[in-house]
Image (cartoon, rainbow, N blue to C red):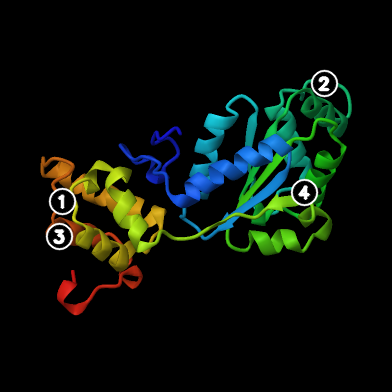
Amino acid sequence: MNTSSDGHYLDLPNARLVPTRTVLRTQKQLQSAIKLQAMLCIHGGVGLGKTLTVRTCLRDLAPDTTLFFQFPRYCPLTDIKKAVATALDILDSTRGLHTRIVDALTERPYILVFDETQGLTTDALEWVRTLWDTVPNRPTVVFVGAEDTRRHLRRRPALASRITQWPCFTPLHPAEVVEHMPHYHPVWSRTSDKDLLWLDDAACRGNFRDWAKLTSAVQELLIEQDQPLDAFTRALAREALTTFDPSDLHLLPDEGL
């Protein structure tokens, strides 16, 4: 699996995608969906690595046929059609837009990824369903979105009935924090299990986006102090935690900032 830092929150240098159970499961589910030319919905809380995982897995599985879309909330269907047509490089045709899109999708086994699915309108979702139903060489459709995405799609039974898998992203368990964070970034490569769990409980709570924020802050401090990236100390961590919103922190009285 590609583990480069491309797409990490804050474009964090030296960060790697780590093979958590969720990442490996998602890779298998995407493989299955592509094989079956199916639909699936990947959902879960913000900052858990959904988009990065999907992008990275599909760079490995289908780099030449994946089209990735993210639209503003309630984006008009006409704009969505134009974006899909642009990605397929067919806007210069004189024929009807929908027909051109259907014909183009028929030519290759495309994977259409719709990020932030919870913001798509009913018209947009119904149009995607129609594409999947009518294109002879059905595209694989991957919906990615926040916690309410599953409920958003379930309100549309005709679409929901066509979705074969509903993988949910959840925060890292403490054991996964200890296992994977030393490989996520050099900053944590020599950090003790106890300190990793302290930081997770204090600020990150198994959320990769919060770990990225903390990692970035610690890395900047180490660079400023001309220290090696693995020169972690609790004093350094406490200074980095001052960049967080205090209401997001959970520190014991004797571990305060």
**Which residue lies under the disc numbered 2?**
93
Q: CA distance from mark 4 to mark 1?
A: 48 Å
Of the two numbered discs 2 and 1 on the same chain, state the one appearing first in sequence.
2
Residue 234 is marked as 3
Q: CA distance from mark 2 to mark 1?
A: 58 Å
Of the two numbered discs 4 and 3 on the same chain, state the one appearing first in sequence.
4
- Kindly indicate whether the residue at mark 1 contacts the one at mark 4 (C-beta within 8 angstroms): no
**Which residue lies under the disc numbered 4?**
124
Q: CA distance from mark 1 to mark 3?
A: 7 Å
Decide if residue 49 is on the left or right side of residue 224: right
Determine if residue 112 is in view: no
Residue 22 is marked as none
Q: Please state which amino acid type lies under the numbered disc 3.
A: Arg
Q: In terms of secondary structure, where does tag 2 sit?
A: loop
Q: Residue at x 82, y 21 (%)?
A: 93
Residue 232 is marked as 1
- Kindly indicate whether the residue at mark 2 contacts the one at mark 3 (C-beta within 8 angstroms): no
Closer mark to the observer between disc 4 and disc 1: 1
Categorize mark 4 by other alpha carbons within 10 Å: few (<14), some (14-19), many (20+). many
Q: Is residue 159 above or below residue 202?
A: above
Q: Residue at x 18, y 62 (%)?
A: 238
Closer mark to the observer between disc 3 and disc 2: 3
Kindly indicate the quadrant of the structure image that contains residue 185: top left
Decide if residue 30 is on the left or right side of residue 241: right
Q: Please state which amino acid type lies under the numbered disc 2.
A: Ser
Which one is in front, 14 or 164?
A: 164
Q: CA distance from mark 4 to mark 3?
A: 49 Å
